[in-house]
Image (spheres, helix red, strand yellow):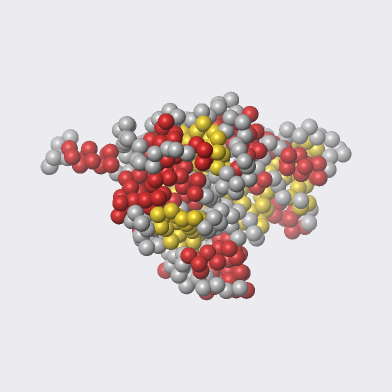
Amino acid sequence: MSYTYDVTMFKETFESEFTWLNGFLRNVQRFKNRTAVSDPLTGKSWTYSELNAECNRFANAMKNNGILKSDIVFNQLYNSPYFVFSYIAPQKLGAISNPANFNLSPGETAEIINHNKPAVYVYDSQITDTAVKALEIAAHKPKIVIMADYLQKYDEAPKGHVKYEDFVEGQSDFDPPIDFNPHIYDEVLRLQTSGTTGTPKGVPLNNINEVLSAHDVMMHFPLTPYDKTMNMTPWFHRGGIHSGGLTPTLYAGAELVIMRDFHPKTTLSYVEKYKLTFLIGVPSVLGLLATRQEKHPKDISSLKGIITMGSPLEKQECIRFQETLTPNIFNGYGTTETFWNTFLRPQDLPEMSGTAGMSCTDDEVRLVKIYDDKKAEPEEVVPTDGVSEGEIIIKCPNKTTYCYSNNKETTKEKFYKGWMYTGDVGTWDDKLFVTIAGRKDDMIISKGENIYPVRIEEAINKFDKVKDCIVTSVPDKTRGEAVAAYIIPEDDNLTVKEVLEFCKNSPNLSKYQVPRYFRLIDSYPTTATGKKQHFKMKEQAKQDLKDGLLLRK
């Protein structure tokens, strides 16, 4: 290919230096004495210079223990300083940070360990039992296992594990030498998204994705070096780490305030104390904040905005949030694979409440026809009439790698011709504002957690008193959706209490996956080929809830 100018230096510089880490290191130089991270629970804070030094100690400790480029550093951590260290330090070695839900069961954790084969596993001491059991189950054994004892619960780590402070003791706080060739296509972060089968889905994100996801947030908030952000949801989610979490905040040179566990009283106190400018959380969390602020108001005038993701905003609730918390409410829609892709700005609300907004600046979102036996072509769009339903597809090469790690089958299923086929169904109007109608894949979203019925059904069916079951959801004011399980007994004497106890003790179910509603039945709706019809069961569950036929745990 011929160019009108010499592109050599541009290509060499851009391809090796356009990384999130280099953006962070620029801030270490220009904002070295400015606070980067504050931890209210311990009262500790780190300047950009101090944060870089701590990450260097962790990186050098891993390097001296043989961790190399492209090695996986798996972690299950609450929002804490250790999460920050585990995000930045691996990038200094060309390794890959791989955060996952700390609420996962030992069996689910073992699945991820076997699938990603991490060289390092860092876990919060609060989930020590889960970590120990997961490592017993897993066939793959990480080379290094680190306990991050944030709450100082243990004098020492379990046998074969090491406490974080002991691991980094005596290590250099200088930047480790770069003995690899950085590239903009290098994977630096691998997020986990739930699967409908036994194979976990790892979402690889490269340097370009991290930099441009940060740019996206900086552009849409906007986010500046003078802001202070706090995420009210866990960072292991795409919306957590990228929407006002580590990625954009530290890239912008702003201050990150840590919230380990959400509580409305604590949140509002932090806003007042730290003069926070942006909060990030799901709509149900905003409702709890508004209730607290109405009864016990704090000075939250520093807020420039609250950003929410995960579900649409109802108009009256939106007005309430604008009047009680801040007039600047934002709402984003997207996926783990693609971050947010449509956006509602304060100027759109409350008029466009209930919609998911229109596509983000660098993204394109379309609604295409739905076929039973094939994907629609990206050009086969449905009318922009607000009525015709189509599948939502997304194009955003700035924020996705268009693939899953070691999972060609699911990659082929979800990605096609530069688009991600979300499985979400909706409508769009003549202004291209999208409204979500439902999900093709029957996924349940409860308090921001993605839950797949098939996984729960597989776990319940292991109970010898259960012949079969079907899992769906019912509306829930607090959670958005709550899990409901319909059970066909193998033993006529089976009780709901027994099923509940089995679920609570199952190593394959997380706490948030345990059903809240149960009903014993004789049969459930199926297709002619015997496939479960979850959509019909969902409609029945709504009626059963109204009629009082579902037993609540």
| Image location of residue 198, percent across then percent down | 59, 32
Please name the residue shown 35% across and 41% down the image: 174
Q: Which residue is at a point 38% across and 52% down the rendered structure image?
A: 48
Q: In the image, 549: left or right of 295?
A: right
**Rendered-image quadrant of the N terminus:** top left
| Residue drawn where x is 66% and y is 56% of the image | 475
In the image, 475: left or right of 31? right
Q: Is residue 373 above or below residue 292?
A: above
> Which of the 4 image quarters holds residue 35?
bottom left
Residue 94 in the image: x percent, y percent? 38, 35
Query: Residue visible at 45% across and 59% down?
Result: 229
Whether residue 287 is visible to the viewer of this picture, yes or no, is no
- Nearer-the-camera pick, 492 or 17: 17
Residue 389: % across, % down = 51, 52
Q: Is residue 283 visible from the viewing direction of this image?
A: yes
Position of residue 431 measured from the top left corner of the image (x, y, whole percent): 40, 62
Residue situated furthest right in the rendering: 493
Question: Is 150 in front, or is 111?
Answer: 150
Q: Residue furthest top?
A: 139
